[in-house]
Image: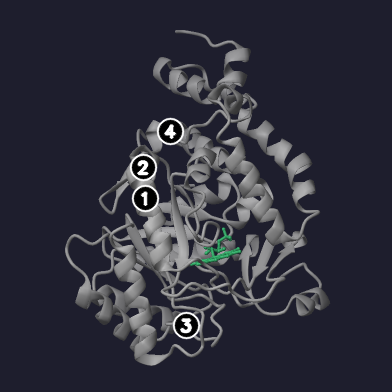
């Protein structure tokens, strides 16, 4: 049996892990290593996050994405000094929706609304990303400030208001990227999330036409499409979370939908009651929608540590982050028990640690997404989640993530 030095185990946790698996390297020593990802994570929480949190949240997002993009263009040797993971964990590679995902952790919609950061997202180690929401007409969104941190809750409130460059232009950008750099999306599928244009004047049949036109733009660019029927930030305050409205919308989409179109998923809100969710699910299942994203942000404010007067000062918007987690977990296990085999469930809402990822996958999630977790934990949390999944699979003796036992501890 080959024995690995502490140096090797500390320096190359993932390579050592794979080698360890093949050689039967003793587990206790492996469990004692300090993964590189933990050190990178500490650097983020103790150095980078305090600096970013000095800035207004939206500015911090812009600064971080620009710096990140510049950084990931550095020569490979420089990148490897601080970033060891290429996002590939052979044991975590899976096929869903006819697509290959190099790992199950995806970037949730809203982070890269205009598909400007695909290279950065891949570089950070995500297994896939959902771009958008895009809308038929471009929109500048709501007036600023429109993004707020609730540090005590490890949460955010946003009322961005679907700011984006418009479906045609974003989808063209993705197509150009795919042509210019086909490797970029290899094992790194591209979801496009579509919503209704942020304009209260667009209602009824016009609203349906608006959605359908985004769908038509997205279908030639996306690897999968998510229908965002649950955005709490529409100017008219309404969503498509009504059985009749959703039926009409899906009918209109399926009228133009062809067999070659990418798989279609629907994104639900965490706020709908069981009866409404069951009704919406029935409407989607009637059309054999291929999967669901659970969930969007919440309009509720219950159980938060942040003071009531601060919440009042912030005002309306969608809550995201840690407070959503228990709801996400419940919805995932509930929906998994209601769905026929083969439907894809993407869990989203409050994911910020390997432990939560294990819980979501055990409850029935096929894929995961996060946004707020990235803001609070930094990019290393992606590799930490994937490392821990591999380690747990090793403990359970599971060769591939698709063999993960549902309701495993
Ligand atoms: C600033 C911000 C903007 C968002 N924009 C969108 C969006 O345009 N479309 C969408 O479907 N979800 C959007 N979301 C919701 C996220 O995709 C996700 O569903 C939600 O934040 C819960 O995940 P999290 O707790 O990991 O952040 C947004 C979230 C945030 C924080």
The crowd level at tag 4 (other Cα within 10 Å; few <14, some 14-19, many 20+) is many
Question: Do the residues under discs 2 and 1 have CB atoms within 8 angstroms?
Answer: yes
Q: Residue at x 26, y 64 (%)?
A: 340
The crowd level at tag 2 (other Cα within 10 Å; few <14, some 14-19, many 20+) is few
Cα–Cα gap, marks 1 and 4: 28 Å
Q: Which mark is residue 176?
A: 1
Q: Is residue 197 above or below residue 72?
A: below
Q: Report x, y in % for residue 368.
A: 46, 53
Question: Do the residues under discs 3 and 2 have CB atoms within 8 angstroms?
Answer: no
Q: Nearer the viewer, residue 36 or 159?
A: 159
Q: Earlier in the sequence, mark 2 or mark 4?
A: 4
Residue at disc 1, secondary structure: helix
What residue is pinned by disc 4? 89
Question: Do the residues under discs 1 and 4 have CB atoms within 8 angstroms?
Answer: no
Question: Do the residues under discs 1 and 3 have CB atoms within 8 angstroms?
Answer: no
What residue is pinned by disc 2? 180
Instruction: Determine which quarter of the picture holds residue 288.
Output: bottom left
Q: Is residue 193 above or below residue 299?
A: above
What residue is pinned by disc 3? 239
């Amino acid at each position: 049996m080959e024995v690995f030095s502490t140096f090797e185990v500390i320096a190359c946790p993932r390579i050592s892990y794979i080698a360890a698996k093949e050689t039967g390297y003793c587990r206790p020593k492996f469990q004692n290593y300090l993964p590189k990802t933990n050190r990178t994570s500490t650097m983020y929480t103790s150095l980078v996050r305090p600096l970013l949190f000095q800035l207004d949240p939206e500015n911090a997002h812009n600064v971080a994405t620009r710096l990140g993009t510049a950084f990931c263009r550095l020569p490979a040797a420089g990148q490897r000094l601080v970033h060891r993971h290429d996002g590939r964990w052979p044991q975590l590679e899976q096929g869903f929706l006819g697509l290959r995902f190099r790992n199950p952790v995806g970037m949730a919609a809203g982070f890269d609304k205009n598909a400007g950061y695909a290279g950065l997202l891949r570089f950070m180690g995500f297994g896939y990303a959902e771009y958008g929401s895009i809308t038929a007409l471009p929109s500048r969104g709501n007036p600023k400030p429109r993004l707020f941190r609730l540090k005590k809750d490890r949460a955010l409130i946003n009322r961005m208001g679907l700011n984006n460059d418009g479906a045609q232009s974003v989808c063209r950008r993705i197509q150009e990227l795919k042509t210019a750099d086909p490797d970029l999306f290899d094992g790194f599928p591209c979801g496009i999330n579509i919503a209704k244009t942020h304009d209260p004047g667009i209602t009824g049949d016009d609203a349906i036409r608006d959605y359908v036109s985004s769908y038509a733009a997205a279908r030639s660019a996306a690897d999968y499409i998510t229908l965002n029927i649950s955005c709490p930030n529409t100017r008219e305050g309404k969503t498509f979370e009504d059985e009749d409205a959703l039926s009409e919308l899906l009918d209109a989409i399926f009228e133009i939908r062809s067999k070659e179109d990418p798989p279609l998923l629907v994104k639900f809100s965490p706020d709908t009651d069981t009866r409404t969710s069951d009704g919406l699910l029935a409407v989607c299942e009637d059309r054999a929608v291929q999967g669901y994203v659970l969930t969007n942000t919440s309009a509720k404010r219950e159980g938060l540590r942040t003071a009531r007067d601060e919440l009042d000062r912030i005002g309306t918007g969608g809550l995201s982050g840690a407070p959503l987690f228990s709801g996400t977990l419940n919805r995932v296990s509930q929906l998994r028990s209601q769905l026929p085999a083969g439907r894809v469930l993407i869990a989203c809402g409050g994911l910020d640690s390997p432990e939560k990822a294990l819980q979501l996958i055990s409850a029935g999630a096929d894929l995961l997404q996060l946004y707020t977790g990235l803001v609070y934990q930094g990019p290393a949390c992606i590799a930490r989640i994937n490392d821990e999944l591999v380690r747990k699979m090793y403990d359970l003796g599971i060769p591939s993530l698709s063999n993960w036992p549902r309701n495993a501890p």
